[in-house]
Amino acid sequence: MPPINNIVILTGAGVSAESGIDTFRDGGGLWEQHRVEDVATPEAFARDPNLVLRFYDMRREAIQTKAPNAAHDALARLDAAWQGELLIVTQNVDDLHERAGAKRLIHMHGEHLNAWCTGCDTRMPWTGPLLDRPACPACGVAGLLRPDIVWFGEMPYRMEDIYHILNRADLFVSIGTSGAVYPAAGFVREARASGARTLELNMEPSQGSHWFDEARHGPAGVLVPAWVDEMLG
């Protein structure tokens, strides 16, 4: 079996769930009692910005009370120790990977603790509320800041960088994802087409589980530390 030098890891909601962060939808298709269409689309923001800003202010405040779990810690340990190329691509919008110590990281769906000025196109760290329509620190104009979150219908961030590294990967690992949200759900096929081995670590088989060479099922906080131990010998 060829040696593994370059690793791409995709993480989803199942990684942060064990830290007490709700997964995107519950069984009824709702996100904290809201329809996704009411809080996670550009159209929703245009229609009722106060509802959207209030919703994300609550999420932003809640995330700051959570802590990384064993899966975040294990991935940060792998990031620090791995001598080859490694990239963690996360669909999560919390900062738990960073707080665990991960450095080689892309937030493809944005970050709760960032704001984006739609006037001057500046992105900036933001931990406070947006509902009171503060002025942008960069351009000084009030009322133009929105959560730096990729909503449905918007293009995920840094896709060119992600595909460039995926095409060089020797191993692609998907952790805690549903396999239902594109383009991330297609990463396994992109990696396979480039000759990478593929591994799924998930609570249950994802919608794309059949594309993986190997799948292990159980809590991320158990599976991920065990896999990292294997990789680091």
Image (tube, rainbow, N blue to C red):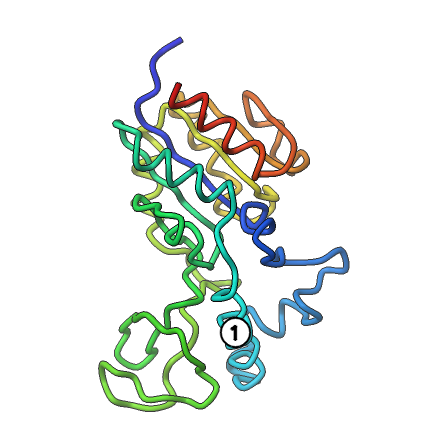
Q: Amino acid at mark 1?
A: Tyr
For label 1, count other residues whose C-alpha is less than 10 Å away and answer few (under 14), some (14-19) or many (20+). many
The residue at 30%/31% (across/down) is 81
Q: Where residue 164 sits: x, y (%)?
A: 30, 38
In the displayed structure, would residue 73 be above or below residue 6? below
**Which corner quadrant of the image does residue 29 belong to?**
bottom right
**Which corner quadrant of the image does residue 178 belong to?**
top right
Residue 161 is left or right of residue 171, and the answer is left
Residue 16 is left or right of residue 82, and the answer is right
Q: Secondary structure at mark 1?
A: helix
Residue 67 is left or right of residue 79, and the answer is right
Q: Which residue is mark 1?
A: 56
In the displayed structure, would residue 132 be above or below residue 25? below
**Which corner quadrant of the image does residue 213 belong to?**
top right
Is 76 in front, or is 170?
76
In the displayed orientation, state which residue is furthest to the left.
138
The residue at 49%/70% (across/down) is 60
Q: Where residue 43 sits: x, y (%)?
A: 54, 76
Q: Where residue 72 sits: x, y (%)?
A: 46, 44
Q: How many marks?
A: 1
In the displayed structure, would residue 10 be above or below residue 61? above
The residue at 63%/67% (across/down) is 36
Residue 112 is left or right of residue 178, and the answer is left
Is 54 in front, or is 167?
54
The quarter in which the C terminus is drawn is top left
Q: Where residue 144 sits: x, y (%)?
A: 36, 84
In the displayed orientation, state which residue is furthest to the top.
1
